[in-house]
Image (cartoon, rainbow, N blue to C red):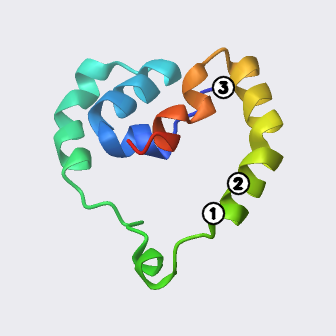
Amino acid sequence: MLLIRFEDYKQNITKELIRTYQFLGLDTGVVSNRLDGIVSQEIKNQGKLKKKVEPMLENTERLLSEFYQPFITRLSGLLEDNKFLWKDLKAGT
């Protein structure tokens, strides 16, 4: 199973697409000429409504983080990949 975080995809589309092709067993050399066209496309999901919503209350964010933390920790352990702890995003990067 291949899981891709949207944050990683958005940061380096080419890398994630190559990883996906490799996972599927496709020849990345054949598709590399198509990657430029795919990578240059505008991201459709820009979160346009996000601008209209006020920031989450700190207390709400804390409660949600505490609630989901055991599930996030378990997911990261099952995948053996600490990036699924999303610590890089909690730090504001």
The three-letter amino acid code for the residue at tag 3 is Met
5 or 35, which is in the foreground?
Answer: 5
x 35%, y 26%: residue = 18
14 or 82: which is nearer to us? 82
Depth check, mark 3 against mark 1: the one in front is 1
Above or below: residue 46 compared with residue 92: below
Residue furthest to the top: 80
Q: Position of residue 26 (x, y in %)?
A: 41, 21
Q: Residue at x 71, y 64 (%)?
A: 60
Distance between the Cα atoms at labels 3 and 1? 35 Å
**Crowdedness of circle 2 by 10 Å Cα count: few (<14), some, many (20+)?**
few
Q: Earlier in the sequence, mark 3 or mark 1?
A: 3
Disc 2 target residue = 62
The mark closer to the camera, 2 or 3, is 2
Identify the residue position indicated by label 3 in the image. Answer: 1
Name the side, left or right, on which 15 lies relative to 35: right
Residue 77 percent location from the top left of the image: 74, 18
Asked which quadrant contains residue 39, the reply is: top left
Where residue 13 appears, x then y in whole percent? 31, 39
Which residue is denoted by mark 1 in the rendering? Answer: 58
Which is nearer the eye, 67 or 35? 67
Q: Is residue 47 above or below residue 79?
A: below
- Name the amino acid, label 1: Glu
Identify the residue at horizontal 41%, vertical 79% (top origin): 51
Task: Choose top left, top right, bottom left or bottom right for residue 70.
Answer: top right
> Which quadrant is the C terminus positioned in?
top left
Mark identifier at residue 37:
none
